[in-house]
Image (spheres, rainbow, N blue to C red):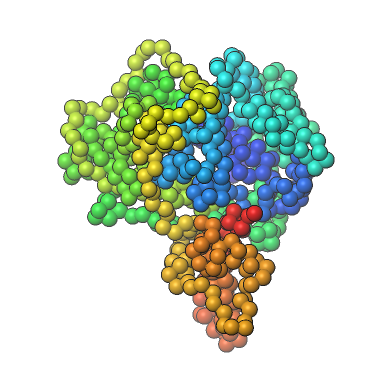
Amino acid sequence: MLGSPGCGVLQMNGQPTAQNTRECGADGDLPGFRNWANDDHVADLARIWNVEPERIPHHAPPTHAMQIFRFAEQGSVRLLWISGTNPAVSMPDLARIRSVLAQERLFLVVQDIFPTETTELADVVLPAAAWGEKTGTFTNTDRTVHLSEKAVEPPGEARPDLEIFLDYAGRMGFTGRDGTPLVGWTGPESAFRAWQECSRGRPCDYTGLSYERLRAAGGVQWPCDRDHPDGTERLYSGGRFWAAPEYCESFGRDLVTGAPVEEVEYRSLNPSGKAVIRSAGYLPPHEAPDELRPFHLITGRTVHHFHTRTKTARAPQLRDAAPEVWVEMSAADAEAHDMREGDLAEVSSPRGVVHATVRVTGIRSGVLFLPFHYGYWDLPEGAARTRAANELTITDWDPASKQPLFKTGVATLRLLERGGGPSSADRAAKPDRLGAERRWPMRSRDERNRPRPAGAAPRRTRSRPGSAARLRTPHRRPRDPPRGPGPVRLVPAACARARRDRRPVRCPPGHRAPLETGLGAKLRGKGGELVGHRGPPGMPLLHDLRHVHVQAAGVSLDWEMIAQAARGNRDTALLRLVERCHPDTLRQMRWANAHLKQLSAQVLHG
């Protein structure tokens, strides 16, 4: 199927540099498609970086973005550095995201080329250079590596991202295990040579490339090495894959719970290193339409804007082509709700409201569509926060890919005022020349710390384009995070029962508490009563997960005993029942174990 002309997979990345970030590990995985659960891969990376293997986080699966925000919300993450993205518009449940980023205990650094909704919440803003203002390489989805040369100087105080990171590493004095500087490169070309060594022998091998060659060739597809000096047009020829247990990037995940597959299980499934295709049954979303909120809500993109309009809304033609948010609905739904093209409607969900003009389209009945691009940076001071589609979306994510679920919410809709015709979203772009305003004026630390006039809002909550009160609106926490769909819907219920029924541990006089030493002592020291509510915010959840794992382990043992009894009595019907049910119990154990590993490092640190 793969490895022949016309048989490839059409992959459309959302961002132009998404491929390189995956190769380099900027998505949270290890560089060079290394496997965090493979000790040999970790040791090889430690050798290249000149650090001890223990310094490379691999005690648990990589922490995804939604989990990072939860750790920041709980207080175990105290410094967050956001570079080149705008989560105050792009993440789900924006009221919650704003409250997390606006916490006084969280030190927020934001690095970007323009002011955004996220820079408004930052303690430190680092102005970065845009693509034409720095040198580096970009890799397309088809693995073609291009060299992008610096064309103009960055304006004002803006600096290339690499220069900012190198400056930070130098000021922090980071060193390797032999005391030499941790970062040994000084600019983009020397950093590229370091990346070549990091990619050696891995699927994305760059060792046959150089700036000189890329200038001459204009673009080369990796892997490019001694065996493929001219690059590689097509992967997987002859049925050769990168799936061998010793080489693969990952042992896989349970598609229902997201728990990592262990190496022993992967080897038994795939001893010959062939490609593995797995399936997963349909699972209904956590929210379903009802009488109160009868619509499915989905969000997505429009051709005129990219991501959160940080750049495209500063280009007049693109801005004027789609200046405001709109909501699409079917003709049947519009008639049923007395809505007309161009009317102003309020779309609401359990998390917030959005005001948008109505567009009547061929969309399926029972579904509302909102483009997610629109935020608040270009609105007047004090404007209401009723424009961003992610005010409505749910805090939930796919268990395997860890991607937020932007297309599974529910909503209702009501008329605010009659419009005067077609939605403004249909405007054609004006033929005037494309242009864009440049960076915001940077203020010095003295200016930022200057005493504020009497009666002024606190600095952290004052926001251009919004009010302080809106930024600190109390938010609803997820009802049962982290959770797993499907068979492990039992897990949230078990957690709820544990929270309802738990009591502080009391021991009879003269008896030692069962967990008085070792981990139990640390749990007591961190959390007061072993199962009480005092201590770090994550302690109750950590206890619940431990309780779930213990309960699932006990049930697993019960299934094994029942299976033995069924075999002894030659009861094939009972044995088939065990074979159907026992894997779900093991799945719950793996789910709880994965979250215990990840959460323990946050809650029990220090």
Q: Residue furthest top?
A: 432
- Seen in the picture, residue 239 relative to 221 is either above or below; the reply is below
Residue 340: x percent and y percent?
A: 19, 35
Frontmost residue, 243 versus 34 = 34
Please, is residue 456 above or below residue 564 in the view? above
> Residue 214, image x and y in percent?
69, 22
In the image shown, does 165 or 489 lie closer to the viewer?
Answer: 165
Q: Quadrant of residue 162?
A: top right
Residue 148 appears at what percent x and percent y?
A: 62, 21
**In which quadrant is the C terminus drawn?**
bottom right
Spot occupied by residue 522 in the image (x, y as percentages of width and height): 63, 64
Q: Which of 470 and 182 is in front in this view?
A: 470
Horizontal placement of 91 versus 196: left or right?
A: left
The answer to whether residue 291 is visible is yes
Q: Where 537 falls versus 147 (above or below)?
A: below
Nearest to the observer: residue 227 or residue 112: 112
**Quadrant where the N terminus is found in the figure:** top right
User: Does the image show residue 401?
Assistant: no
Q: Does 262 sit above or below residue 163?
A: below
* Residue, far right: 178
Q: Which residue is drawn at 34% across and 21% down?
A: 320
Q: Which residue lies furthest to the bottom in this view?
A: 569
Residue that appears at 55% across and 68% down: 530
**Residue at figure coordinates x 62%, y 83% from the top left:** 510
Direction from residue 604 to residue 360 in the image, left or right: left
* Left or right of 368 in this view: 578: right
| Mark count | 0
Residue displayed at 57% across by 79% down? 507
